[in-house]
Amino acid sequence: MSTHSHTAALASAGVLLLPVTLCAQGTLADYRRSDSLRATLQGLVVNAPEPATWIARTDRFWYRKAVRGGNQFVVFDVSSREKSPLFDHERLAASLSAAANKKYTAVTLPFSTLTLSDSARSIAITFDSTAWTCDLSAYRCAKDTTSAGGRGGRGAGASATGSQGVLAELPRRSPDGKSEAFIKNFNIAVRPVGSSRDTVLSSDGSEGNAYVLQTIAWSPDSRKLAAYRVKPGYRRMVRYVESSPADQLQPKTFERFYAKPGDVLDVQQPVLFDLDTRQELVLDATLFPNAYNMTRLEWRKDNGAVTFEYNARGHQLYRVIEANAVTGAERTLIEERSPTFFEYSAKKYRFDIDDGKEIVWMSERDGWNHLYLYDGVTGRVKNQITKGSWVVRGVDSVDAGKRQLWFRASGMNPEQDPYFVHYYRINLDGTGLTAFTQAEGNHVARFSPDRQYYVDTWSRVDMPAVSTLRSTSDQRVIQELERGDATELLRTGWRAPEVFVAKGRDGKTDIWGMIIRPSNFDATRKYPVVENIYAGPQDSFVPKNFSAFSAMGALAELGFIVVQIDGMGTSNRSKAFHDVAWKNLGDAGFPDRMLWHKAVAAKYPYYDITRVGIYGTSAGGQSALGGLLFHPEFYKAGFSAAGCHDNRMDKIWWNEQWMGWPIGPEYAASSNVDNAGKLQGKLLLLVGELDTNVDPSSTLQVVNALVKANKMFDLLVIPGANHTNGGPYGERKRNDFFVHHLLGVEPPDRNMLPVATENGGGDDDGLLSWDEIWERWGWWND
């Protein structure tokens, strides 16, 4: 049959036909490779370990490692230096398969973590939102209806005045178990456990200024109480229309509380009660006049005082306050002031030693995130514990007896990526710094219960994980446990991402990013560039750990170079680096990002910065559109999903933290809505109609502004979806969008692809898989 006859036959069957003149990127072969990338790469790296978990009160630990076709759980005995399967994987798979009515194998168990109990004779696991308990002696698995996972419980994490479900309604029992406190007619009342005779302690509670049950804190001696009386602020409700409910034809509506920047907030008033004297002490608000929020009330062990932390509205002032339980007199133990912001969400740490006689405190006051030792009696700094041009990433524990502190940090090794996490110990007086991890990579160290040993697991984007057992006393390697093997992965043509560093806007600061090339990369061709952006100031985002598959890699296979960068304004570097975001989220590090791109292009001629696309979700969605609006000379096409396009429309806690309070002109300056008329490039907006993270109206307000400005763009609304990039459907739309606008190639018309038959084994959208299409019609691109 002639080529023309083949063409006519396939076209009549509704099969996608690509023109013979198709360029070398965006071909059917590229789509096939991209869509099958996860399946192609899955299971090719073996012996790569995950971080270890020590078994309580033993010198044994377990971890999960990659094996051919899946994973295996391993237990290691330090005394015997022997490792073995944690359980009989075959028997557990059979038991779970029978109990869950799904097919699992020994290496495809549906969970990645577990909790051992009953001397390791049973495990608790959760998968598919269901909790299970498995007996490892009889290998019987059953649903655990008593756990929070089994009930679908909310779990911990609610604020001092937030909802905690059913638990919030239970009386608060005293430490001695004899009394319980509860709310009666908006006031605090107490009664003996088991009795209906109560005593009302307060009389100033009312419907508009009520005591809140879950804020009640008993003193250790059970003779005093502390609680917040709360005057509600503005109850802003965001309303939703669920257009396509599963259980009925007609739409449904619902609403949820959603505070936004500038809203009037709850006023929390701490009050102390003495049960013996019936004395009520309403604390003076001089030290906490304008709270964004205040932390839970905590009693000193000697019953003499209560402490709480005050976060001032605007997040430029933060105090640790102590109130005398007898007089109500208050004093500031620690105060943080910043002309920009105090990062309370991720860079606040406090540990009280000896009932508050000393306090370990975290602060960026010297320009880097470090730890300080306070005198809790005088409120003065005794000494700075850590110091240097590097950052503390977290405190693991404080040993008050040995006066040592165990912590994580990054940037201490000048020859390494400054984002790599390493583990250390230091004395509280700042001496005796000891490093427990040295290898060039991103580390997780897990110490034994007695801290005699630790398991160090690390990797890089170009190196699978390695795990060693070490001695804490001298950090020597006792035994290498696992070393990931990527031999089979490399045989597929897989390319490791390249870590690339260039100078930022100040000409001095290193900006770190990552370059991903397609597996069929050809340096003689030109490649358009697509940047995956998330510039939220709460963290840094460029991956540091090894992964065989990434969604960015799948996009690259279509004929792009895909990159990710941490520009100024993101976290985990110096305070000055971070402060670029202050009242300036529209900046999103773009001046650094564009310089980074230009540096890559200067080194690699195939890196085409005349065709740069950008995509992101949530804050990344805001930045993706912002790239087109504020830097149209550089970014030519953008995919923006679930964006918080105007920071006045988004959640209060995230946006006031970085954009400040009260609302100023900076909000409008960073707004994609107010600047929508600047659009020059190609834009695809996506939003889930039921997004409870970012108000969906934020996207529709951008749409409204673009329409009024007579700007052309595409919009995809996903019915029933929450905060999302659109899932597989949205990712396909995004990929096709960039293929069309940056490669200049018409993407596959998926509507013309044949539908899978019962024997066809199609993918989740009912279409033939690319493997099947290729087997039938792949000759067209040969």
Image (spheres, grey):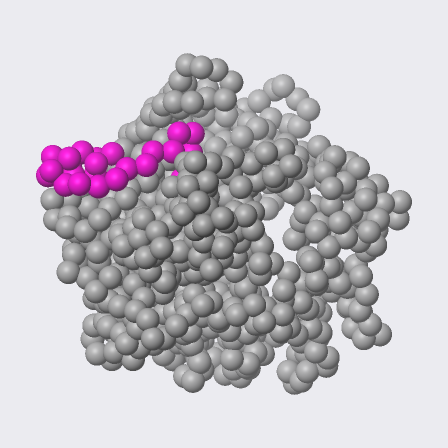
Between 378 and 384, the one lying in front of the other is: 384
Q: Is residue 266 something that shows in the picture?
A: no
x then y, percent, for residue 5 = 44, 45
x then y, percent, for residue 506 = 20, 75
Magenta region, residue range = 700-724
Q: Is residue 693 something that shows in the picture?
A: yes
x then y, percent, for residue 642 = 34, 42
Magenta stretch containing residue 702, yes or no? Answer: yes
Between 154 and 564, the one lying in front of the other is: 564
Q: How many discs appear? A: 0
* Residue 58, placed above or below residue 292: below
x then y, percent, for residue 770 = 51, 49
Residue at coordinates 47% horizontally, 60% vertically from top-left?
782
Between 64 and 76, the one lying in front of the other is: 64
Residue at coordinates 56% horizontally, 51% vertically from top-left?
775
Magenta stretch containing residue 107, yes or no? Answer: no
Residue at coordinates 32% horizontally, 49% vertically from top-left?
746
